Image (cartoon, rainbow, N blue to C red):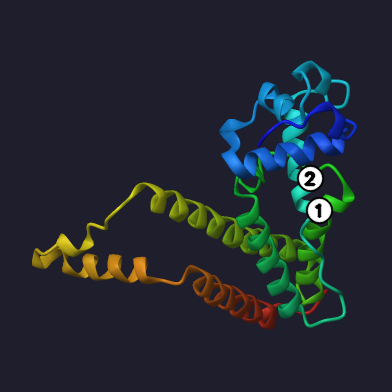
Amino acid sequence: MQAMNTAERPPLSRDRIIAVAIQLVDEHGLDALSMRKLGAALGVEAMSLYNHIENKDDVLDGMCDAVMCEIPVPPTDGPWPDRLRSLAMDVRRTGLEHPGVMALLGSRPVLTPEGFAPVAALHQTLVEAGLSSERGLHAFVFVAAFVLGYLRLDRGRVDANRTRTGRPYSVWDKSEHKPAARLGVQLVALDWDVEFERCLDLVIESLVAVIAAEPPEGA
């Protein structure tokens, strides 16, 4: 990312600082983010940033909130499995676009109602599907753990592909290792986009079964 010259530089603002920080992390990873580098990318001295943000933690919080705001909330009039599927797919899409920022989720607060909207929408979807508010919270954690966990697999797979030129499984020729070798080859051959949708089907099917067994409210 190159700094702009003064003539073409838009005014400095909190929103612009956060947007450029996200771009910096998207391109170079979370470890590349520092106030000095962020200032350079914006074409200003790092100290100028503090007129608009408090510190680096404020930048990290703002990045998380801004990325969460990119996740669309599905209409509330569709079937709940379709709404849940749409949310899960959009969270993964956003996570693949901003892997460094999404890795922060769970460790940083969401600052605005707009950023929190996808979280609230998922919980509300589960409640409207037939779960109590408390059970809906447990189901929310279940779905979120699957989607965010899958993003960790996505990220690890991308990192591994950058550093590995070969796979060891084909040389595990001892008889006791052959089942593991077959499994390793199968895992490498997976289409992870297709696999996400198949696993999401299992998540939804399990929730359908849980909801069917849910006792009536007040029973």
Q: Marks 2 and 1: CB-CB under 8 Å? A: yes
* Nearer the observer, 52 or 91: 52
* Nearer the observer, 94 or 36: 36
Residue 178 vertical position relative to residue 44 in the rendered view, above or below: below
Give percent across and percent down for residue 173: 11, 64
Q: Is residue 162 visible in the rendered structure shown here?
A: yes
Q: Left or right: 93 with respect to 49?
A: left
Residue corresponding to mark 1: 69
Give percent across and percent down for residue 9: 84, 33
Residue 112 vertical position relative to residue 88 in the rendered view, above or below: above
Q: Residue at x 86, y 30 (%)?
A: 7
Q: Residues within 10 Å of mark 1 (few under 14, many from 20)?
A: some
Q: Residue at x 75, y 61 (%)?
A: 134
Q: Is residue 62 visible in the rendered structure shown here?
A: no
Amino acid carrying label 1: it is Cys
* Nearer the observer, 135 or 29: 29
Residue 210 image label: none
Q: Residue at x 67, y 46 (%)?
A: 105
Dividing the picture into quadrants, the one containing residue 60 is: top right
Looking at the rendered image, the quarter that the N terminus falls into is: top right
Give percent across and percent down for residue 86: 72, 72
* Nearer the observer, 109 or 163: 163
**Mark 2 and mark 1: span between their CA atoms?**
6 Å
Question: Total number of numbered labels?
Answer: 2
SS label for mark 2: helix
SS label for mark 1: helix
Q: Left or right: 180 with respect to 52?
A: left
Dividing the picture into quadrants, the one containing residue 131 is: bottom right
Amino acid carrying label 2: it is Asp
Q: Left or right: 148 with respect to 191?
A: right
Q: Left or right: 126 with respect to 207?
A: right
Residue corresponding to mark 2: 65
